[in-house]
Amino acid sequence: MSSTQIRNYVAELSNLKDQFNTLSSQSSEKLKKIIQTVQSYQTRMEPLNKNMEQLQILQRNLESCRLKLSQVQEYYRTGRELENTIRQGPTVYTDKFLKAMERIKDALAYFQENNPQDVEFSRLTSLYSIGLGSLEREFDGLLRQTFCPMDDATLIRLMDQKVSDKESGDGSITEDTEQMEDIPNNMLNSLRFLAKWMSENQSFVNKPQSISQGCLAKYCECRRELIRLNLVRVRELLRKAENPSSSSGTVSKPGFLPPNVRGRTKRLPGFVWDISGVRLINETETDELDSEHYAIALGVLVKLMQNECILLDRLQLTASPQDSQVLLFNIFKKGSSDILTEGTTLTRLMHRAQGRAEFHMVMSLLVVLKKFFQISDDLVSVLQGIDNVIIDFNQLVLRLLSQSKITLETYVQFLQQVTEKSSSNSNVVPEDGTIHELTTNALMYLENLLEFADIIGTTLSFTEAGPQATTNTLKYLTTIGQNHAFLENKFGEYLFNAIFALMTNLERKSEVYSEEIRRMIFQMNNIQYILKSIYKTNIHRYLLSQDREAVAKITSILDERKLFYTRCCADILHLRPFPESCGSSSIRRRKASQFGSVLLASVLSPNLNTSHHKLSITNNEQSQEIMNEHLTKIDQKERSFLKSLWNDFNNGLNTLTKQHHLISIPDRELKNSLEHQLVRDLVVLYRGFWEKSMSIAFTTNRDKYIKLSVEEFEIRIRHLFNGTSTNSTRQ
């Protein structure tokens, strides 16, 4: 490119620059004029904008005033428009009534804030109170419609329902319990919604008790009344089941009662399960006091309590767990009051029965205590946090335990101290020396106690556990029930004391007999019956758990009585196998009266042996040697003495025969044992006496004195027992 072209371009660019500067200057001036014009316009528009804002504010205020006026007019019309609706009440539960209540509540809020002195405020307050009252009645009606007493099938299932296993259970609610009442969810939702609405809309009600508390009170009243009715129906079902002829419907069918409801097959003489039938008892206070029925109702009550906890959790009527506990307390306190009162009456009646020596009535308390053993876990769990109610149950169980302990211990004292009364047929010893009525009743009583072994073990030992057992008795039952070995030992100790108290008493009763033979037979009959009974009824298992030598000690006493019986027979026959037994009748009688001390020494001695029998054999040999010495050199005086011995023997044999005709030995084993023992001991002695007498000419008329051969004497001894009666059914 040439220089000329370059200069031309530069000149052209310079020209364009000048033009641009000129245009820029002109544009700047125009923009300034425009800005000035806009600023002038804005200045003139500011008053107008302010006027527009004021107009808009006025417009909004007017609209607000119009709306407020409309609302105020509506508030003033609310009372007149809704009065009929409120006074009619929610005949059918709909939203219409609640919407009317919402309108009244809004109107009340306006008048309370702006004009509480207005007459309309009083009118609306009255209508609102009427409406809430109607809703409360509707809630009550809905409760009655939703909840009703359980049908018989459900109650029977509750009676049949087993308690939770103490070994593995934790007191939790089972699935069966959850389905106790089949209540539709929509009914529960309606109750929940209505209670919540009244709780949230009660600020204008001037009542000492709020509406929400009134609803809870209605709920409590309904539920505790249902508990009462269900328990009453349980009693009716049980009574009708025992008297099917007086019942109708389902309960009259055979097998109505559930299989685990305890039968009453074994009853003591004079035993009264229904305490209402006990004499000298006020019928007005014992209307429902059947201990079996009471125990079953107690188990049902626990299930009903568990059901209340589940139902309250579903309804969610309370705002906190503490409120739930208060609500459950109000339900359980009234629902269990009858049960607690009846339990206290049971202990009072037992105290009266004990004063009449009707100790068998303790079974009534033991039946109830057994049920408390079974339900203690569940009861402690369901009453957790409800201290006042669980304290009442603890006190009841403590009273039952205390009264049972007193009665059981008093019975042992009764066995040992009861005396013979000739005016009472039930206390006079049997003439034939057979088993005393006290023995049969005592063994039957102890047999009936076997069912309650653990309960009695706890009853006798709970005072040794300290404050734990007396302040939290139900919890103590759950723990002590797991120590079966300890409880069996305590029960075995009680049986041991009762049996030996009985035996001591029997020894004292035997003093009524004038003949020592009947005394011994009476004692042996009763001891043999005791031994047979403790094996037949398994009492021996508990005795051995307490003392392995317990049964052996009783047997040793029987063996000693057998030995003493043989001595008595020998004394009567004047065979005198035991020189230490010879002497006056007063000496022998004094030795017989020492049976009590011998019995205690035998029981306490750990080394029972047959030393007495060995001593008797030694004495027999010494007696024979003495006889031989006398017979080698015999004179007239000694011949007369020998004749006197045979006369005494013959008279003694007749006396022994007559006495054995007056006695009875019901047990065949005992009879055979005594027969064998007499033949074994007396025939040997008679043979020696007979042989020595036959070898000496002490008389010319030997048959006058020696009337029996050895074989004939043995037959006479065996015939002693043929004359006694034997009842094989009393083994």
Image: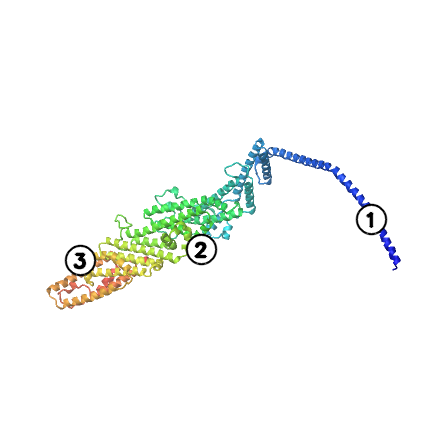
Circle 2 Cα neighbour tier, 10 Å, few/some/many (<14 / 14–19 / ≥20): some
- Image location of residue 197, percent across then percent down: 56, 41
Using the image as rendered, state which of residue 671 and residue 524 is in the foreground.
Answer: 524
The image quarter containing residue 344 is top left
- Image location of residue 13, percent across then percent down: 85, 53
Q: Secondary structure at mark 1?
A: helix
The residue that disc 1 covers is 21
Using the image as rendered, state which of residue 292 and residue 366 is in the foreground.
Answer: 366
Quadrant where the N terminus is found in the figure: bottom right
Using the image as rendered, state which of residue 154 and residue 308 is in the foreground.
Answer: 308
Q: Is residue 60 visible?
A: yes
Mark 3 and 2 residues: CB-CB less than 8 Å, in contact? no
Circle 1 Cα neighbour tier, 10 Å, few/some/many (<14 / 14–19 / ≥20): few
Question: Real-space Cα distance between discs 3 and 2?
Answer: 66 Å
Quadrant where the C terminus is found in the figure: bottom left
The residue that disc 2 covers is 166
Looking at the picture, which amino acid does disc 2 mark? Lys
Q: Is residue 326 left or right of residue 102?
A: left
Q: Secondary structure at mark 3?
A: loop
The image quarter containing residue 491 is bottom left
Precedes in sequence: disc 3 or disc 2: 2
Question: Which residue sits at x=36%, y=47%?
Answer: 350
- Image location of residue 622, percent across then percent down: 19, 66
Looking at the picture, which amino acid does disc 3 mark? Ser
Looking at the picture, which amino acid does disc 1 mark? Asn
The residue that disc 3 covers is 584
